[in-house]
Image (cartoon, rainbow, N blue to C red):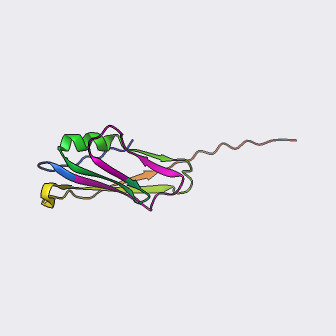
Amino acid sequence: MIIFIFIIVGDIMDCTLTAIPSLSNTEQLILPDNINLDKEITKEGAMISGVDSIDSYQNILRQIAYISKSPITYIDRTFTLSCSGVSDQVFTNEIRVQVRFVFIINLILYFF
């Protein structure tokens, strides 16, 4: 689970989650369906927009899921998150989260 924490005063206008490198065909981001904000998911990441409270955005960000059907494609996956306040007067610092896949391979030897 990826948890994003940020501090901003006032309401938020939008948040952008960027995947580095872009998502492949075997990866996807899932955003919650029960939000009253606009959302867009692309291979580059996701954007949530619309004026709402900090608590609402934090709740949405905590529910974002990342799925990789082929984790061997990228052993390291980086996501960056940045948000802006109403009237674009306040911006959060960029937050970087790196996901590292660890593989344990079981070797089975067959003796004939």
Q: Determine whether 55 is above or below 92 in the image.
A: above
Question: Which residue is more in the foreground, 32 or 112?
Answer: 32
**How many marks on residues?**
0
Quadrant of residue 87 in the image? Answer: bottom left
Where residue 2 appears, x then y in whole percent? 36, 44
Residue at the extreme top of the image, as rendered: 34
Where residue 66 appears, x then y in whole percent? 43, 46
Where residue 21 appears, x then y in whole percent? 44, 62
Please indicate whether residue 10 sits to the left or right of residue 76 in the image. Answer: left
Q: Determine whether 95 is above or below 60 in the image.
A: below
Q: Residue at 32% x, 50% y: name it.
A: 39
Please indicate whether residue 101 sits to the left or right of residue 33 in the image. Answer: right
Q: Residue at 29% x, 49% y: name it.
A: 38
Please indicate whether residue 52 sits to the left or right of residue 16 in the image. Answer: left
Assess whether residue 42 is covered by the magenta stretch: no
Region of the chain picked out in magenta, as a range:
14-40
Residue at the extreme right of the image, as rendered: 112
Where residue 59 appears, x then y in whole percent? 27, 39
Quadrant of residue 61 in the image? Answer: top left
Residue at the extreme bottom of the image, as rendered: 21
Assess whether residue 35 is covered by the magenta stretch: yes
Question: Which residue is more in the foreground, 12 or 76?
Answer: 12
Quadrant of residue 43 in the image? Answer: bottom left
Q: Residue at 32% x, 41% y: name it.
A: 62
Query: If the image is split into quadrants, where does the C terminus sit?
Result: top right
Question: Which residue is more in the foreground, 30 or 4?
Answer: 30
Query: If the image is split into quadrants, where does the N terminus sit?
Result: top left
